[in-house]
Image (spheres, rainbow, N blue to C red):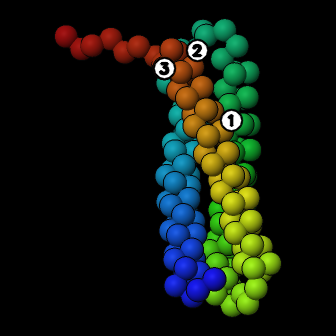
Amino acid sequence: MTKKIVSAKVDEMYRESKHWNSCLQLINDELTFIQHLLNSYVFEPNTPNLFERLQDYQARIKRSKDDWDKLSKMIGRHENSIGGILECSDSVCDNFYHQKHEKLKVEAVNYMENFKDLKYEIFEYAGCILKKRKPNN
């Protein structure tokens, strides 16, 4: 493979990993917001199973934060190693980096989809049980 093609692949992999990092930063902000929301006192107190439901969501958010941390570190290490593809002298080495990148892509996409589903579930539930404030007349 020519240096030009390899360099283009490296650039593409690097751009993709930067995109994942950007998405993860937004997710981290959303995780923090959701944690604050779940720990606030904005829910109708007489909602059936409110405590249990909030506890479940808090535990799932904590697991998501832990997964976020692991994935973020994996992507950081991956970004640091992408340049190694330029040192490859054979297709086996080249394929190793591409397979590693594709595997990480699957993990990143799965994590983002799972987080999106969890966020949607929490917002659907929370939207129905928020305290209704009476307008001031």
Mark 2: which secondary structure?
loop
Circle 2 is placed at which residue position? 45
User: Looking at this rendering, what residue extends furthest in the right direction?
Assistant: 92
Circle 3 is placed at which residue position? 127
Q: Position of residue 82 (x, y in %)?
A: 64, 78
- Residue type, numbered disc 3: Gly
User: Label for residue 58?
Assistant: 1
Identify the residue at image location x=70%, y=13%: 49
- Residue type, numbered disc 1: Gln
Foreground label between 2 and 3: 3
The answer to which quarter of the image holds residue 79 is bottom right
Identify the residue at image location x=68%, y=35%: 58
Q: CA distance from mark 2 to mark 3?
A: 14 Å
Left or right side of 107 for 125: left
Image quarter in which the N terminus is found: bottom right
Left or right side of 1 for 137: left
